[in-house]
Image (cartoon, rainbow, N blue to C red):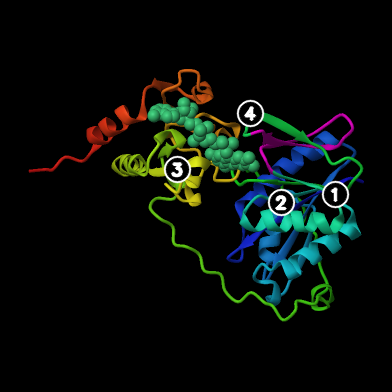
Amino acid sequence: MSKIWVHAEVVDDKIVNVAFELLSKAHDLAEAMGGGTEVEATLVGSGLEKEAARLAEWGAKTIYLADDPDLRMYSPLTFVPILAELAAKHQPDIYLFGATATGSALGPAVAARLKTGTAAHCVDLRINEEKKLVSLVPSFGGKVIGEILCPGKNPQMASVKPGIFTKKDPIPVPVQIEKLDSSMWKKLDTQGLKPVNVVRRPPQGLPLNEADVVVCGGFGIGTKENWQLVEKLAQYLGGATACTRPAVDEGWSGEYCMVGTSGQSIRPKVYIGFGISGATHHICGMNESGVVINVNRDAEAPIFEVSDVRIVSDVNSILPLLVEAVKPKASW
Ligand SMILES: Cc1cc2nc3c(=O)[nH]c(=O)nc-3n(C[C@H](O)[C@H](O)[C@H](O)COP(=O)(O)OP(=O)(O)OC[C@H]3O[C@@H](n4cnc5c(N)ncnc54)[C@H](O)[C@@H]3O)c2cc1C
């Protein structure tokens, strides 16, 4: 019987949403594979029995649970060998990870131990005629979508950003938790290293994924001064700022607000972009937005293909005017 596994990442003792998104997708893949393919999950952490039951609500038939206070915090020295040993023993056909900061490190490390491949930051997954996993990944600067296969190896592994797949309605199955014996990690040589604390940077401004209005700056904004106008416009509209990869590379903005395959996926009611070409790497993180407005001086820019309102103009002429137009007026 074929098996699709999803690794359920835990942050602050709770399973993160991308695990449920992946479980929903895993069910579609299982249906395409046929032959009673089962969906199962792996879970590592501490005090997670209740959380494990939530996985069963989303149709994970068997949950392999490594539960121990020593595993409360992520460490590659324990998580990687545990998951690799489990996969080697149970031989899943497909193993999916969230492309979060942790999942992006954990998935490939597990793949390396299993001497298999992993397709990172996929924008879609499907099953081909040979019942093999096809991972779709933007390539060549996002100009083409590459189809990645992992012939002759199992598990076929892939990671997907949060928000790419939709968390569908629950498909409850009876909980079947397989608790793993602690000898599996007690025997590991962690060289005396143990994570003791995680310090997270406090969120700056309105979180991107909660904003109704997102103002996004691309390479075409040209200067740090224009980036400040992008921030002002977002602030005056009560929204959040986002950016493309080059805006991060130029040092105008931080990676925390990058949108796309290596950044966040957003669905604001209104997306307003300035100087963005429309590479697939970026579009796949914003194409579920409500009304999409873009300003670009190139009338042929691909971003206009996913825009409801297309403004062919120079950022330098339109951005200062817009900021001035929405600036709160003094009330006296
Ligand atoms: C593995 C990988 C992952 C990646 N992940 C991401 C990701 O998550 N997010 C992301 O955004 N990118 C990502 N990228 C990069 C991505 O492929 C593109 O290079 C990037 O999205 C392009 O950003 P841009 O549109 O801002 O810049 P460009 O492609 O350089 O486009 C700039 C646009 O601005 C316009 N312009 C220039 N000057 C002006 C002006 N004065 N007024 C008006 N318009 C102007 C131009 O006509 C052009 O269309 C990734 C790349 C790789 C290889």
Quadrant housing residue 66: bottom right
* Cα distance in 3D space between marks 1 and 4: 28 Å
Find disc 2 in the rendering and name its residue: 97
- Circle 2: element type: strand
Mark sitting earlier along the chain (1/2) = 2
* Residue at the image point whose x is 43% and y is 35% from the top: 269
Classify 10 Å Cα crowding around label 4: few (below 14), some (14-19), many (20 and above): few
Residue 56 image point, x, y percent: 73, 54
Find disc 1 in the rendering and name its residue: 155
Q: Relative to residue 188, is residue 211 depicted above or below?
A: above
Closer to the observer: label 4 or label 3? 4
Find disc 3 in the rendering and name its residue: 242
Q: Relative to residue 301, is residue 20 depicted above or below?
A: below
Residue closest to the eye, 161 or 90: 161
Mark 2 belongs to which amino acid? Phe
* Cα distance in 3D space between marks 4 and 3: 21 Å
* Cα distance in 3D space between marks 4 and 2: 25 Å
* Cα distance in 3D space between marks 3 and 1: 36 Å
Mark 1 belongs to which amino acid? Pro
Mark sitting earlier along the chain (1/4) = 4
Mark sitting earlier along the chain (3/2) = 2
Closer to the observer: label 3 or label 1? 3
Q: Please tell me the numbered disc located at residue 143.
A: 4
- Circle 1: element type: loop
Quadrant housing residue 7: bottom right
Going by the image, does 39 lie left or right of 130?
Answer: left
State yes or no: discs 3 and 1 in contact (Cβ < 8 Å): no
- Mark 4 Cβ inside 8 Å of ligand 1: no
